[in-house]
Image (cartoon, rainbow, N blue to C red):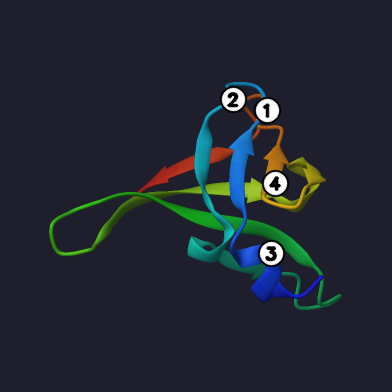
Amino acid sequence: MRWSEFADKELIDVDGGEKIGTAGQADLVIDDRTGKIRSMLLPVGSSWFGKKQGEIEISWHQIRKVGPEMVIVESSGKGRLYQK
């Protein structure tokens, strides 16, 4: 699957059933030794000037299912919230 196809999908937390964001908003963390995706960093909140207030890191291993319109993510406390 190409990133352009993946980027339009909504990320849904299977535990809470809530929308986390869209994959297109995320920055990718890539392992520089293997070239594999380690995690995605999703912005949380925004101020008037578009400055993000924090980010959630979702490990690539937390993704459970990629469907035609959404991606199911199992957070169960594993996702980390960083406030900047």
> Residue beneath label 1, please?
14
Q: Is residue 72 left or right of residue 48?
A: right
Marked residue nearer the N-terminal end (2 or 3): 3
User: Which residue type does callout 3 highlight?
Assistant: Phe
> Residue beneath label 4, please?
71
Q: Is residue 50 above or below residue 21?
A: below
Contact, mark 2 vs mark 1 (Cβ under 8 Å)? yes
Marked residue nearer the N-terminal end (3 or 4): 3
* Residue 13: image location, x then y, percent: 62, 32
Q: Is residue 12 above or below residue 56?
A: above
Which element is circle 2 on? loop
Assign the N terminus to one quadrant of the image: bottom right
Marked residue nearer the N-terminal end (4 or 1): 1
Q: Residue at x 51, y 37 (%)?
A: 19
59, 49: nearer the viewer: 49
Q: Is residue 83 left or right of residue 37?
A: left
Which element is circle 4 on? strand
> Residue beneath label 3, please?
6
| Separation (CA) of disc 4 from disc 2 | 12 Å
Q: Residue furthest left?
A: 48
- Mark drawn on residue 65: none
